Amino acid sequence: MREKVVKENPKVVKEEKEEKENGNEEVKEEKEENEEMAQDEDDKVVEEEEEDPVGMLPKEACLEALAELRHAKWFTTMAGPLESCAESIRIFKDMSRRVPAFACIGDWGIELLCERSIATSLEPPTPSLAILRCLEVLASGLLSADGFGIKDPCEREARDVCVSLTPQEREDITALAQDYVRKIHFRKMWQVLGIEKSPSYKERKAQEAKAKEAAQKAAQEAKAKEAAEDTVKTEVKTE
């Protein structure tokens, strides 16, 4: 007997395949939802069961200590080798102790400011030029409301170090930096550093001349005293 060959309609076959695929996708989605629900429940149970041990260090203090370690490594690799960078950082930190406006930047912000300012210079600057360059960067409006700010290189996310500054503090820092730049250009660096004014060349020459005159007078007086003593001794001998 010959077997009868039944020809299947291709449209019907496609519809059946699509129905099977849709059914499989729905089943997969249900399984994934069930697995996620189960994982969430397990996580909740673990969180409820696990408790912080007694005498555990505070989390915030540990994070701050790790941040300080990252800052120290960054300083040794980036800021340490730069010429005049360490000196300018010390001077800026001294200025922050004397001037309340610069104290708002913080030590970490000052280190980043000096390193970025000096690293972008074409030639290695002297300490005085390094300070001037850092002040010029601040005077240009880096920390103003519409400025770029100072990004933290030790954090994964883009974070501004001076994000906590108020608009008034930003204006005070910018205005003070502009004033200091003006003083340096007018040769008043001693006012920026908070020290006594050093005498000029003419004043030093006058002081040296006065010191020589005083020394000569003292020598003449000493000679006169010796001559008077000698005359007294000779008179006593003759008697």
Image: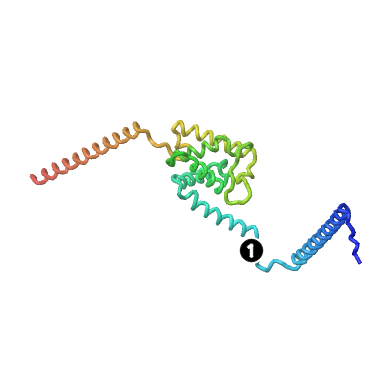
Mark 1: few/some/many CA within 10 Å (<14, 14-19, 20+) = few
Does residue 106 sit above or below 2 in this rendering? above
The residue closer to the viewer here, 189 or 85, is 85
**Outermost residue toward the front in this view:** 1
Q: Residue 60 placed where, x, y %?
A: 64, 57
Colouring scheme applied when the structure was drawn: rainbow
The residue closer to the viewer here, 25 or 189, is 25
Task: State the residue at coordinates (34%, 35%).
Answer: 204
**Relative horizontal placement of residue 84, taking residue 150 as reference (left or right):** left
Does residue 49 sit above or below 206 in this rendering? below
Q: How many marks?
A: 1
Q: Secondary structure at mark 1?
A: loop
Amino acid at the residue labelled 1: Leu
Q: Which residue is mark 1?
A: 57
The residue closer to the viewer here, 134 or 98, is 134
Q: Which quadrant would the C terminus be assigned to in this image?
A: top left
Does residue 162 sit above or below 176 in this rendering? below
Task: State the residue at coordinates (74%, 65%).
Answer: 47
**Outermost residue toward the left in this view:** 238
Q: Residue 224 placed where, x, y %?
A: 19, 39
Query: Quarter of the image holding residue 140?
Result: top right
Task: State the residue at coordinates (56%, 44%).
Answer: 103
Q: Which quadrant would the N terminus be assigned to in this image?
A: bottom right
Q: Residue 158 placed where, x, y %?
A: 63, 47
**Relative horizontal placement of residue 54, taking residue 202 as reference (left or right):** right
Q: Residue 221 placed where, x, y %?
A: 22, 39
